[in-house]
Image (cartoon, rainbow, N blue to C red):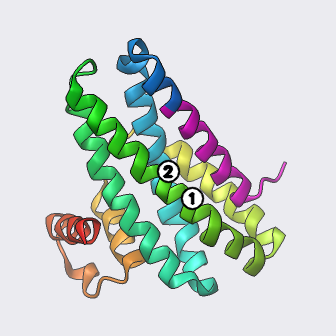
Amino acid sequence: MQYDVVDLIMQDHREVERLFDELKNHPEKRPLLTPVMCGLLVAHSRAEESEVYPPAKDAGGQDEVEHSQEEHAEAEQLLAKLLDCEYDSPKYEKALQEVIDSITHHVEEEEKTVLPGMRKRLSAQRRYELGEAFARSRADHLGELPGQATREELLTQAQNLGVTGASNMTKEQLRKELEKAASS
């Protein structure tokens, strides 16, 4: 069966929104759902970065992809901060709200610009091919948490951002470049 990558991405968005609601309204579920939500977001991001953003960039969406990549870097920093909080602390509440605000903003922009652009600029067959690649990559990354990206994944993120000289950078240099992009 074939799945359109745009539909798969939007399904993940709805699931993350559901998890946000659970985390906000059912604090007793936080010890179990926080790592689930973080793992889903990391897997989703890695799959978009490796399988979706390069063809979207090639199809005329360079500015949109670079902006989305910056937001992924910011979200990963916020998720790492959230994971460092005690689940019943005010610090957790604040960190969760920062994650929700950041991800909600990203989802709204992506669903308004990047995804409609992909539907318009890419054939249905290409979207199905990307859907298969996205689902496979996402499955490969499930369970990973913020901060666990390999050098190759950081290099892909830097290339999506248009960072020059990225292929010659160490893993730590790439991480610093991405942190700069997230805070700009």
Q: Residue at x 34, y 65 (%)?
A: 152
Spot occupied by residue 159 in the image (x, y as percentages of width and height): 38, 78
Residue 13 showing in the rendered view: yes
| 87 relative position to 161: left or right | left
Indicate whether 138 appears above or below 83. Answer: below
Spot occupied by residue 52 in the image (x, y as percentages of width and height): 58, 67
Q: Which mark is residue 104?
A: 2
SS of the residue at dot 2?
Answer: helix
| 147 relative position to 124: left or right | left
Rendered-image quadrant of the C terminus: bottom left
Q: Is residue 78 magenta?
A: no
The outermost residue toward the top is 28
Residue 141 showing in the rendered view: no
Q: Which mark is residue 108?
A: 1
* Nearest the eye: 174 or 109: 109
Q: Is residue 6 magenta?
A: yes
Q: Residues within 10 Å of mark 1 (few under 14, many from 20)?
A: few
* Nearest the eye: 13 or 143: 13
